[in-house]
Amino acid sequence: MSDATIEVYETEARQFPPSAEFAGAALANDRSLYDEAEADLEGFWARQARELISWDQDFDQVLDWQLPYAKWFLGGKLNISYNCLDRHVEAGKGDKVAYHWEGEPGDTRTITYSELLDEVSKFANVLKGLGLQSGDRIAIYMPMIPELAIAMLACTRIGVAHSVIFGGFSPDAIIDRCDDAQARLIITADAGYRRGEASALKVNVDAALAAGASTVENVVVVNRCDTDVTMAKGRDHWWHDLMADASTDCPPVSLDSEHLMYLLYTSGTTAKPKGIMHTTGGYLTQVAFTHKYVFDLKPDTDVYWCAADIGWVTGHSYIVYGPLANGCTSVFYEGTPDTPREQDRESDDRASWSKDRLWDIIERYGVTQLYTAPTAIRTFMKWGTSELEGHDLSSLRVLGTVGEPINPEAWMWYHEHIGGSSRPIVDTWWQTETGGHMITPMPGVTATKPGSACSTIPGVTAELVDDAGNVVPEGGGYLTISKPWPSMLRGIWGDPERYQETYWSRFPGRYFAGDGARLDADGYLWLLGRVDDVMNVSGHRISTSEIESGLVDHPSVAEAAVVGATDDTTGQAIVGYVILRGGNEASLELAEEIRQHVANKLGAIARPKAVFIVPDLPKTRSGKIMRRLLRDVAEGRDLGDTTTLADASVVDDIRAGAAEGE
Ligand code: PRX
């Protein structure tokens, strides 16, 4: 890791107090959870498991650790849907709102805990009626509608493992995932609303089933958009038909703590996605714990909103399982942040639409916690503060960010413009594999530094190591987790060798997260991104995210992506792509100025070989920048598969611009 960058942040950055006063934090200035976990790790997690979760049968062993396989809360039995629903209804909270759901066109549904319990019980009976039983796997390929959460919870009620496939994926992805998991059923919808239009889903399932996924016996289809679909007789069933006669009586099945709860596929270094396995007791304990303390939850009054998609782990843990286990009220939104409700659109001309949907939702529901991603925050920066005008965001108490390193500039913008310069920001580092938060500040406890994820949560131990595996007490290194944690992945479905190889071989005895990080003199962690995104320029390691921070530090730059392009002389050369903030004109002079700005800020080694000003960046539908494509453009290669791009024309624009700039 390069040493120069973070020091710049450190010396420049103010340190923000823990904001206990504003957040009214449960943990105000209280480090007792950290102390307790440090003194007795297993005792600490056992207490959380018993306090936050209801067990049908108490566990008799907290942890069984046979590296790299962990089992948590052995002997314990529980049911996830019981924990998320029944127990709140039994406690008299049946009328409490579980979800304020809002569709992209502006239609809404308010779902209480008792209504959700009824729907989940009915759908669990539907699943049983289709022959599914504990231990089976099914796939879910749905838009962000309540039936998605209902389907997941219904699985957990009867011990069926779900594999949610992000709605933006192609038929091939459905085939790969269904084949790998031997899924017996797919739950889908005709379509979902996205960017003002009905985006078809069922046709992709049809295409997948025509070409493969031969283990799938049945398809259940929600009618979301009333679009035309073909229903295969005997195989395809309408959700509403099956639910019409279903009984609300479906007792939750008591499951072993280590019962397989879900698979979630994530990409690795090879083309074949990995089916990350999560199990029941440990997963629920850690997501409930982190959801409660990291968001400083006041379950009786909060209206919490995680603006992610349930197709990713963030939505699993922090839209469905954490918030429901804690009995809180959440907002659940179907669409994109820049699509106004139909009733708020003055014309069909997209360009004229306002981009204030998020702020409108926060204001209308009185949202208290907002959890989103740096890429979204930088997009809001690009749209400008005029979209915020007239919106009262004072209900917000805690702001969260996840998914990639947040640059200090975006952190400060979030803090100032959304957080009124007073709300704590929790920058949460974790992964599909970790199941729940691992590194994050705690409101009321941790003084934050803009751009730093700060430190591990109580009960998690992270260490940086160098190439040789030696612990790095200060400076840059590879991020490893040195002790098992309750919501850790239990393996890769069907591939124990790959599990061992990917996560536990690089540094024996340690979980290697694949990320680089830096520990500053105060013991704060600064995530530098995936080490596969680290460039090597003339023998110096430089993280793409470091350079990106340098680029977005220039006042004209709204967003940036950096790739290491092969270079005969220096090994790799840094190539930057930047989007300008509104009001700036693209020119070669400005590109040169931005290039120089990075050199001034980070040192000459960090000066990009080229900076291209582009109108947009190629992103996956989940918002991640596709650096591979940018690298292909930088190296003048033909582009490979671009089907996962949200907007394929973006690359052509960039290529045209790059050619012009040469
Ligand atoms: O590189 C880290 C980055 O996202 C990776 C995990 O991606 P995924 O499994 O898709 O899960 C994303 C949502 C949890 C990590 O290896 N990452 C995630 N959160 C942060 C982050 N990088 C820096 N800061 C974060 N807060």
Image: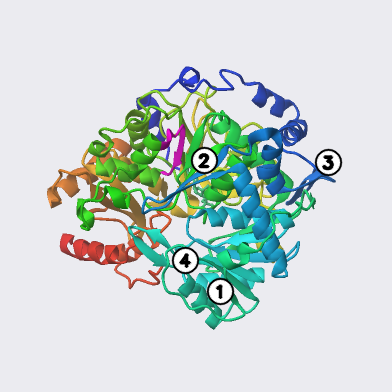
Of residue 657 and residue 246, the one placed in the foreground of this image is: 246
What range of the chain is rendered magenta?
365-373
Q: Residue at x 73, y 54 (%)?
A: 249
Q: Amino acid at mark 4?
A: Phe
Q: Amino acid at mark 2?
A: Ser
For disc 1, the marked residue is 175
Q: Is residue 558 magenta?
A: no
Q: Amino acid at mark 3?
A: Phe
Q: Which mark is residue 169?
A: 4
The residues tagged by marks 1 and 4 sit, at their Cα atoms, a distance apart of: 11 Å
Of marks 3 and 2, the one in the foreground = 2
The residues tagged by marks 3 and 2 sit, at their Cα atoms, a distance apart of: 31 Å
The residues tagged by marks 3 and 1 sit, at their Cα atoms, a distance apart of: 38 Å
Residue 228, percent from left and from top: 42, 74
Callout 1: CB less than 8 Å from ligand 1? no
| Local secondary structure at mark 1 | helix
